[in-house]
Image (spheres, rainbow, N blue to C red):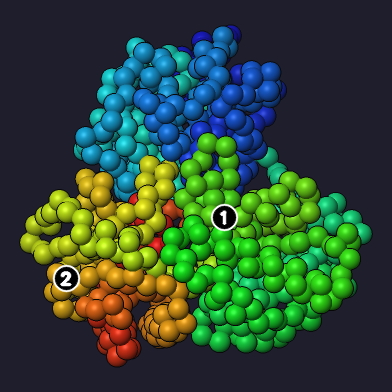
């Protein structure tokens, strides 16, 4: 019986009967989506071996593959298609193929269908209506929540295909060939906001591709072996922020190589939380880390960041300042650099958002992914034991290493720290933003204004750098406006965030103004962050949140005043997530205390999910 005949003869349970062969893994074809590696990660957690391969992969390189998943991507199949091997869709003995987002659109375009720009973009959750009982949707209810991130849509199916799922705005949300094992989803099953996404991936891998879950070597043993192989007799100079990632990396290196072969360096940049460096030193010493040194580099970072306002420029400058401080300490210690490697607590989202794969868009450069460090990695001189893991996996490793829970469950804090939570504008940009004539965005029942400031977002896997829309309403309307935020962002290309004004005068009275990363602005950020952290801990909400950035924005009644934005955020791995709505009593206490700070005119609440907004504003 050939593969196609086996596919047609589905058994009564709805599981497609495909003869077992020597095929042993799922090939994930990477078209550059920010979520591609979540596909790999989900398959790994299901016990399924998978490999990430380029779109131009040859058929001989697919030996042993049981199926293909064509990932999403930031490009458009209409005008900026990624070059790929078209034979993937025309195999004589077809492998099961699942196209996700861009992958679906590629299937539709190249097999005789039609793709067109959507009348509205879709970023965020949608309700999927399942059509019938297709094997891909085994165990998925008739109505479920899925996660969208796209601009183009399939408007005409290729010959032989049928619709197996739709939303209220998208008829072709899920499709399948009537005879061949080819399927397509416009939504992203790999993100956890698609409620039954893992069920769909399991159905594809285990029931359609007929792969059995395999036992994979534990992450800890695998990473330990990699550290030993790379380090050999060399020592590792590790940059330690004191956050979850660098602390777990420090523990792994110490356990694997020994304290004498690892040197930990914590750099006080002047951009950390209030007295953070003292706290890091005390906590790590209590946890048994005796090989840590703390250096004060505040003057260097202040000098390097003076006059810089663009987010990417700040991130690059911070990354180089970290490296230069490390080199200065090496010279002071008279270390022979031939005997040392540099270590970092880099995790996989850092690489993804920095445009770490060939066709991925750069959302923002993480300070540990600047060009100099990438060069060191290519030379084998950079030790990054956590580089293939996500935050929750890092936490699991930390627990296995018996690190204190307060270290493991601390909120993520960006490497550039408050350098990217204090927004800056140069005079020219501030004047342009204030003078721009923008279309009025009507929010029925509310007064709103597009603010003259900019923030980074991620829309359709691409970086956006746009303005936020602020809405005047009391906090009791937050739930309703949160639901409307995604629709507003899908409809209007001029904005990438939606804010609720919590305190301040009329929105029209405020103006954006030129501002740099000055010590007074950093101190204001530290004070505001300290208040917010204290109140969410008091309200017993801290561990319900992934993160809660407090952002300083150069918008106010005069050039010396500011706005504060609260950004409570819930997620599992930070690649996607939702704005978290704090309880009214907690918000009231926070607002009351923030209003008492000097130079604060407005307080806002960020209602933006990811996508289209990143967690941090820069």
Query: CA separation, marks 1 and 2?
Result: 35 Å
Which percent across, then down, holds residue 333? 84, 76
Q: Residue furthest right?
A: 233
Residue plotted at (56% across, 80% down): 270
Of 609 and 402, which appears nearest the observer? 609
**Is residue 310 shown left or right of residue 339?**
left
**What residue is drawn where x is 55% and y is 14%?**
87
Viewer-nearest of labels 1 and 2?
2
Q: Position of residue 225 (x, y in %)?
A: 82, 53
Label 2 sits on residue: 507
Q: Is residue 377 above or below residue 261?
A: above
Q: Name the residue nearer the viewer: 181 or 471.
A: 471
The residue indicated by pointer 1 is: 350
Q: Which mark is residue 197?
A: none
Task: For mark 1, give the secondary structure.
Answer: helix
Quick one: 268 or 172, which is closer to the camera? 268
Give the secondary structure at mark 2: helix
């Amino acid at each position: 019986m050939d593969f196609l005949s086996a596919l047609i003869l589905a058994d009564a349970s709805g599981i497609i009967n495909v003869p077992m062969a020597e095929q042993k893994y799922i090939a994930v074809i990477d078209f550059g989506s920010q979520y591609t590696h979540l596909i790999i990660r989900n398959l790994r957690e299901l016990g399924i071996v998978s490999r990430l391969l380029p779109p131009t992969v040859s058929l001989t390189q697919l030996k042993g593959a049981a199926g293909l998943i064509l990932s999403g991507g930031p490009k458009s199949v209409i005008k900026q298609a990624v070059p790929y091997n078209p034979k993937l869709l025309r195999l004589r003995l077809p492998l099961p193929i699942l196209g996700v987002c861009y992958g679906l659109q590629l299937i539709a375009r190249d097999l005789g269908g039609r793709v067109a720009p959507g009348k509205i973009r879709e970023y965020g959750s949608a309700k999927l209506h399942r059509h019938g009982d297709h094997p891909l949707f085994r165990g998925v209810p008739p109505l479920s929540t899925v996660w969208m991130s796209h601009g183009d849509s399939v408007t005409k199916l290729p010959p032989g295909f049928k619709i197996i799922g739709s939303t209220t705005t998208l008829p072709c949300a899920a499709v399948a060939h009537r005879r061949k094992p080819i399927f397509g989803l416009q939504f992203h099953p790999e993100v956890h906001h698609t409620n039954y996404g893992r069920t769909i991936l399991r159905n594809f891998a285990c029931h359609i591709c007929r792969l059995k879950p395999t036992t994979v070597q534990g992450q800890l043993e695998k990473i330990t072996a990699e550290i030993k192989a790379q380090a050999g007799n060399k020592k590792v100079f590790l940059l330690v922020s004191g956050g979850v990632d660098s602390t777990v990396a420090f523990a792994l290196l110490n356990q694997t190589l020994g304290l004498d072969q690892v040197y930990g360096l914590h750099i006080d940049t002047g951009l950390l939380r209030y007295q953070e460096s003292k706290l890091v030193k005390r906590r790590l010493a209590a946890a048994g880390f005796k090989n840590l040194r703390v250096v004060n580099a505040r003057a260097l970072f202040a000098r390097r960041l003076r006059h810089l306002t663009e987010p990417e420029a700040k991130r690059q400058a911070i990354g180089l300042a970290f490296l230069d401080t490390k080199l200065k300490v090496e010279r002071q210690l008279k270390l022979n650099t031939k005997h040392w490697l540099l270590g970092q607590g880099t995790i996989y989202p850092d690489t993804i958002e920095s445009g770490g794969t060939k066709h991925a868009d750069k959302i923002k450069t993480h300070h540990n992914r600047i060009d100099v460090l990438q060069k060191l990695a290519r030379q084998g001189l950079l030790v990054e034991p956590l580089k293939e893991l996500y935050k929750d996996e890092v936490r699991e490793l930390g627990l296995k290493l018996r690190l204190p829970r307060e270290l493991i469950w601390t909120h993520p804090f960006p490497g550039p720290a408050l350098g990217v939570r204090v927004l800056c504008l140069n005079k020219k940009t501030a004047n342009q933003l204030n003078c721009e004539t923008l279309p009025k965005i009507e929010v029925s029942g509310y007064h709103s204004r597009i603010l003259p400031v900019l923030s980074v977002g991620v829309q359709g896997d691409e970086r956006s750098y746009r303005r936020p829309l602020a809405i005047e309403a009391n906090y009791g309307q937050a739930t309703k406006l949160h639901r409307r935020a995604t629709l507003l962002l899908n409809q209007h290309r001029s904005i990438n965030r939606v804010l609720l004004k919590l305190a301040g005068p009329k929105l029209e009275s405020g103006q954006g103004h030129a501002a740099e990363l000055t010590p007074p602005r950093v101190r204001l950020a530290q004070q505001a962050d300290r208040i917010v952290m204290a109140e969410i801990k008091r309200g017993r909400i801290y561990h319900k949140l992934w993160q809660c950035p407090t952002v300083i924005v150069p918008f106010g009644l005069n050039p010396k005043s500011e706005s504060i934005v609260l950004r409570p955020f819930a997620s599992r791995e930070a690649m996607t997530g939702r704005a978290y709505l704090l309880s009214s009593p907690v918000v009231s206490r926070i607002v009351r205390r923030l209003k008492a700070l000097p130079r604060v005119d407005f307080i806002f609440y960020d209602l933006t999910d990811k996508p289209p907004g990143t967690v941090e504003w820069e």
